[in-house]
Amino acid sequence: MNLFHIMTKIRNRNYNYNYVFLFYDINSERVSKVFKICKKYLERYQLSVFRGNITPSNLIKLKKELKNIIKEEEDTIAIIKLPGKYSFEEEIMGIKLKDEDDLFF
């Protein structure tokens, strides 16, 4: 089986994603609204980055709220979905933000 078939099978599975990274690049007119919505569901990680545990139903709510605020022709939001907090490896270079768990393993 080639890589295309493997990736197609992976994409067609229904996973429960319980941990997300959310990155945004939003017009300054809407950035505070987007920030407040993200803060309701996730922890702030960097200036335009949030991450954290989230239930599938809350992920749906988060996306719906954001979709009502953004202008798709001007703004960008990327959500990286993972099955859990420990399903990735993180390497931090430079200053580590306070109150962050060390996810190095």
Image: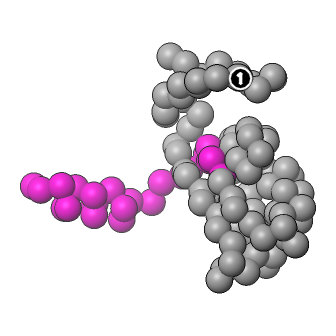
**Residue 51 image point, x, y percent:** 69, 43
**Residue 41 image point, x, y percent:** 80, 51
**Residue 14 image point, x, y percent:** 45, 60
Residue 12 as seen in the image, left or right of residue 28:
left
Q: Which residue is at the front of the view, 34 or 54?
A: 34
Establish if 101 lies above or below 88: above
Q: Residue 5: say if magenta.
A: yes
* Residue beneath disc 1: 96
Residue at image position (18%, 55%) is 3
Residue 14 as seen in the image, left or right of residue 31:
left
Q: Quadrant of the N terminus?
A: bottom left
Residue 10 as seen in the image, left or right of residue 58:
left
Residue at image position (76%, 75%) is 70
Amino acid, disc 1: Lys
- State the residue lying farthest toward the left: 1
Establish if 97 lies above or below 40: above
Residue 103 as seen in the image, left or right of residue 27:
left
Q: Give the magenta range.
A: 1-22
Label 1 crowding class (10 Å Cα cut-off): few <14, some 14-19, many 20+? few
Q: Which residue is at the front of the view, 44 or 96?
A: 96
Residue 64 visible in the displayed image:
no
Residue 47 visible in the displayed image:
yes
Residue at image position (54%, 28%) is 90
